Image (cartoon, helix red, strand yellow):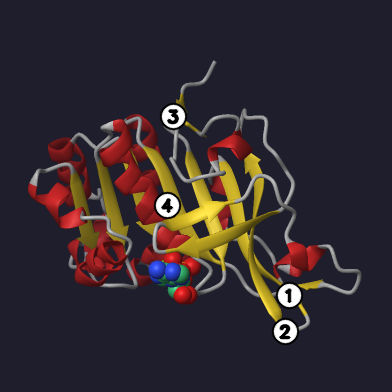
Amino acid sequence: MVEKIKTGIPGLDDMMDGGLPKGSTTVISGPPGIGKSNLAMQYIYNGVSKYDDPGVYITVEDTVEDMENYAAGFGWNVREYEDAGKIAVLGREIFEGTDMDLGMDFGILRDVIKETQASRIVLDSVTLFNYLFKEESSRRIHMLRFLEMMRKNKCTTLMTAELPENFMKMRYGAEHFLSDGLIIMFWSRYRANNERCVWVVKIRGTKIVSDIRPVTITSEGVSISSKEVPFTLLKEDSVEK
Ligand SMILES: Nc1ncnc2c1ncn2[C@@H]1O[C@H](COP(=O)(O)OP(=O)(O)O)[C@@H](O)[C@H]1O
Ligand SMILES: [Mg+2]
């Protein structure tokens, strides 16, 4: 039996037979504003506050300060845990200036994982590899190296990725093939109502609930209802977008 790491996000662990497999990497794909970063930060915050698992959050598009402030908006005092050495929030600048021709060994990240003894990692988002590498082949190689490093360190990793609106027709990127799991968040619409939805597409070696479930974001953070079906999908002429 694979050991499970609980995200602690209401409703989510039940969709993955108890949680994420330890040491696995899961991609959370979705359009802007759907709640990927909130969910990912909640995973890190729950890690330290509920399960005593230290974590590292790498933010690529938002600044470190922004992420800390967003978290504070949900009442998650991330800075306090950073001071205690249990959470590290890293910006993309830590990766810049490395000699890309020689390849990159994620040196600082490795040190931070060691220092914090992190077992939960978030990479928000995979666009990090686009910033760092022009060539598609280098991107893939370094993404693989990153994933290998996570696996070696037994870190359970979430990576966020942008999903185009017409995702049913999209071509999946490298991150979707290289990871162990895929969770898609999307908007469902009926007339003037837009509703956040989640779909656990795959989690390697895990029995998943493949039903689409509604997601809500409140001042407490992200939660998923296990009882309801998204109301926008109950209507005959509803569309996914
Ligand atoms: N306290 C809150 N209550 C309800 N929604 C919130 C709250 N705080 C943030 N949000 C919503 O979270 C959304 C941003 O989520 P975020 O995780 O940054 O999205 P993504 O990373 O997918 O672009 C915003 O649209 C905002 O409306
Ligand atoms: Mg985001």
Q: Are marks 1 and 2 in contact (CB under 8 Å)?
A: no
| Residue 129, percent from left and from top | 39, 63
3 or 4: tag closer to the N-terminus: 3
Disc 3 to disc 4, C-alpha distance = 19 Å
Q: Residue 13 is drawn in which quadrant?
A: top right
Q: Is residue 137 visible?
A: no
**Cα distance between the residues tagged 1 and 2:** 7 Å
The residue positioned farthest toward the bottom in the image shown: 192
Residue 101, by quadrant, is bottom left
Q: Position of residue 123 (x, y in %)?
A: 37, 55
3D distance between C-alphas at marks 2 and 3: 41 Å
Residue at image point 27% right, 43% down: 55
**Which percent across, then down, holds residue 147?**
41, 43
Which residue was labeled with disc 2? Answer: 192
Of label 2 and label 3, which has the lower sequence position?
3
Amino acid type shown at disc 2? Ala
